[in-house]
Image: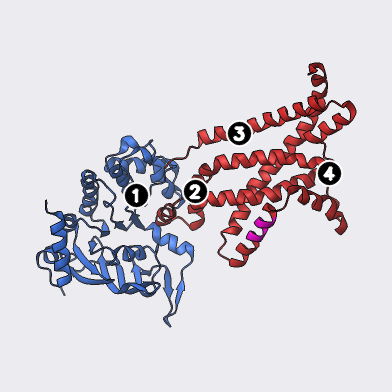
Chain colours: A blue, B red
Amino acid sequence: MPEPLPELLPESLVVIDRVGKSFGANRVLKEVSLTVGKGEVVTLIGPSGCGKTTLLRCVNFLETYDSGAISIEGETVGIRIGADGRRTARPDREVAAMRARVGMVFQSYNLFPHLTVLDNLTVAPIKVRGLPLRQAREKAMALLERVGLSEKAAQYPAALSGGQQQRVAIARTLAMEPHLILLDEVTSALDPELVGEVLDVVQSLAADGMTMMIVTHEMQFAREVSSRVAFMAAGEIVELASPADLFGSPKSDRLRSFLGRYQAAHRI
Amino acid sequence: MDTAFLLRILPVLLEGLEITVALTALALVGAAIGGLIVVAGRRSRFAAMRGVTIAYIDVMRNTPVLVQIFILYFGLPEIGLFPEAFACGVIALVLQNSAYAGEIYRAGIESVKRTQTEAALSLGMMPRRALFDIVLPQALRRVLPVLGNQAVVILKDSSIASTISVTELTQAGKLLLDRSAAPYETFFMMAALYLAMAAVLLGGMKLLAWRFPVRT
């Protein structure tokens, strides 16, 4: 039997299986299923309120989900499901251990303002992983170098521009050596001229084979960086395809009208 | 004003001042720690714990510390306990100011955005570590000025221990007054000493605020 091509059948890292979630009477996720292979970059696009950010936050259990299951590397996220189908909450320790392997970058950077840039990068490796201070610092400096900000190591986040803060936030996430990174509208809070520097860093992570799930409104970026793109609307994945297919030949009316509105808004 | 007289009473007042400093220092440390217990109870995930803590805070904040001292000093002997006057003073100050400190801590904690906790959790920190290493350091910096004011309140309230025969600064002044009948000089001197101690406290807080500035 021939070996399956790894590009075609990547080992799945994240399995989202019919996940449902409601905020009160509002069903924000309706039986969403999605698999992310190792090394894949899956981008979620869709109109505001379609559930893409909620889905992303469910993956590292910042948000709980009501039904279905999410697994990362074979382990269900936040809950355990018994043989009889009963769902029990995982203890904090297990949730934290899962999160240590899953990085997250936020729209509003969320750097720790009372810590220097360097300490922002070392606090979790030291306190969570137990890395010795010197080793943590060396690694942090290397990561700051990578995002082009090593000269800012001793500064506090407030002294940095939005784009610089977001690059530090990405480096902070990388310091934990995550197997998967979730990026939640990482350029939405940035001035337009600062968007590029952040997307370049994300682009370089993709080139290195980092597995990522990305929520974004930057269609051009989604097109360039993604292995696959999921279009969500009203709590469902409406279309899931390669960027060329999804943007080139949208099948559903909802995606066509979404892309149409996006193009109209971005025509100069 | 008779400066020679002032110099003569100063040693007596300084002895009282020592007791005032001891009372205040112990109450400060006690209330700083007690406040942590209060805020933990107030933010507990268990409703019963929150209820008990809220009741405690309400009782402590809405009754005079003078009455609380009387209950300890004159009430406890009724049930066979005979605490020392000095201890009663410390305990009363700690009980009341733990309630205040707890609420000040809480205001600080709630002023730190939820997203800070989320960022800490998403790096794999346990909830407790996120609170102690990320949220509390920011919260405490923000409420340092308020804590400073409360520290001065403790200093001033320590004078209430004079009512149960603790010879702290106020009581020392009163005793002097009985012997010298020079109220103006004695009370002027006392006020100046309290003012000096408050200045030291507030100066210390300023130093802390300078060393640990609020950054956003």
Residue B91 vs residue A15: left or right?
right
Residue A194 vs residue B46: left or right?
left
Q: Amino acid at mark 4?
A: Ile
The magenta span reads B54-59
Query: Which residue is label 1 attached to?
Result: A109
Corner quadrant of residue A210: bottom left
Neighbours of disc 2 within 10 Å: few (<14), some (14-19), many (20+): some
Seen in the picture, residue B14 relative to A121 is either above or below; the reply is above
Q: Amino acid at mark 2?
A: Asp
Q: Which mark is residue B202?
A: 3
- Quick check: do tags 2 and 4 share a chain? yes
- Quick check: do tags 1 and 3 share a chain? no
Q: Which mark is residue B43?
A: none
The answer to whether residue A140 is magenta is: no
Q: Amino acid at mark 3?
A: Leu
- Quick check: do tags 4 and 1 share a chain? no
Foreground: B103 or A200? B103
Residue A59 x/y as whole percent: 35, 65
Gap in Å between the C-alphas at discs 2 and 4? 42 Å
Which tag is nearer the camera, tag 1 or tag 3?
A: 3
Q: Which mark is residue B133?
A: 2
Residue B70 x/y as whole percent: 81, 50
Residue B51 in view of the camera: yes
Find numbered disc 1 in the image and state the secondary structure of the residue it sits on.
Answer: loop
Image quarter in which the C terminus of chain B is found: top left
The answer to whether the residue labelled 1 contacts the one labelled 2, judged by CB atoms less than 8 Å apart, is no
The answer to which of marks 2 and 4 sits earlier in the sequence is 2
Query: Which residue is label 4 attached to?
Result: B164
Which tag is nearer the camera, tag 1 or tag 2?
A: 1
Neighbours of disc 1 within 10 Å: few (<14), some (14-19), many (20+): many
Neighbours of disc 3 within 10 Å: few (<14), some (14-19), many (20+): some
Find numbered disc 4 in the image and state the secondary structure of the residue it sits on.
Answer: helix
